[in-house]
Image: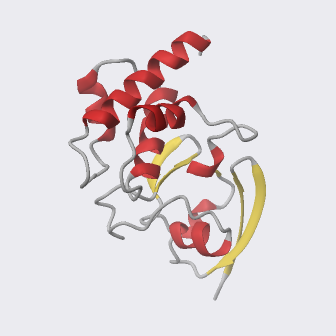
């Protein structure tokens, strides 16, 4: 039996119907057409499906869609403002934080969560904030550099 779920996705009121245990990741990708969040492992181990729910970083492959009722969800598509990339997206592009692209949305969302939480340039703190996200293409150096640059960009902008 499907349940009707109403929530806000990337600032827009949305509604969908889903069986109680359908994953939020599947609804985002298949019903709402938001394919930025990636299916990586389906077990909550890789972080590729990370999104923000009510400002908290979560693994959408582990969240039953029915739990989205009344929440505010931000996906990778929701970070840009009117076609202008968020500082973390710009930094990933400029500093080569993205390689094959599978982990990138989750890394960016984890980094955005870190930035929104007031995180600074401390490399160890950045690595800790990203530790739930796996990348098989990099040694994480460029990803961490991207986050450091995003911290600096936010400081320049007075955020």
Residue at the left extreme? 139
In the image, what residue occupies the spot 33% across and 37% down?
143
Q: Is residue 113 visible?
A: no
Give the side of residue 46 with respect to residue 84, left or right. left
Residue at the bottom extreme? 1
Q: How is the image coloured?
A: secondary structure
In the rendered image, the vertical position of residue 90 relative to residue 134, given as above or below: above
In the image, what residue occupies the spot 37% across and 54% down?
103
Give the side of residue 98 with respect to residue 133, left or right. right
Residue 45, image x, y percentages: 28, 60
In the image, what residue occupies the spot 40% across and 32% down?
95
Seen from the viewer's position, the closer of residues 75 and 55 is 75
Q: Quadrant of residue 14?
A: bottom right
Q: Quadrant of residue 81?
A: top right
Q: Is residue 124 visible?
A: yes
Seen from the viewer's position, the closer of residues 29 and 89 is 89
Quarter containing the N terminus: bottom right
Give the side of residue 86 with respect to residue 47, left or right. right
In the image, what residue occupies the spot 36% across and 50% down?
99
In the rendered image, the vertical position of residue 75 relative to residue 43, given as above or below: above
Seen from the viewer's position, the closer of residues 1 and 26 is 26
Residue 80, image x, y percentages: 65, 40
Residue 151, image x, y percentages: 45, 20
């Amino acid at each position: 039996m499907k349940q009707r779920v109403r929530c806000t996705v990337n600032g827009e009121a949305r509604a969908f119907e889903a069986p109680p245990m359908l994953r939020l990741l599947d609804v985002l990708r298949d019903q709402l057409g938001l394919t930025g969040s990636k299916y990586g492992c389906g077990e909550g181990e890789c972080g590729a499906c990370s999104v923000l729910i009510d400002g908290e970083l979560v693994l959408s492959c582990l969240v039953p869609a029915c739990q989205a009722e009344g929440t505010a969800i931000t996906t990778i598509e929701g970070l840009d403002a009117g076609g202008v990339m968020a500082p973390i997206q710009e930094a990933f592009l400029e500093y080569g934080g993205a390689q094959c692209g599978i982990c990138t949305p989750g890394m960016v969302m984890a980094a955005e969560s870190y930035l929104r939480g007031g995180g600074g340039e401390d490399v160890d703190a950045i690595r800790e904030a990203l530790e739930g996200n796996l990348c098989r293409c990099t040694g994480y150096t460029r990803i961490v550099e991207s986050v450091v640059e995003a911290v600096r960009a936010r400081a320049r902008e007075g955020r």
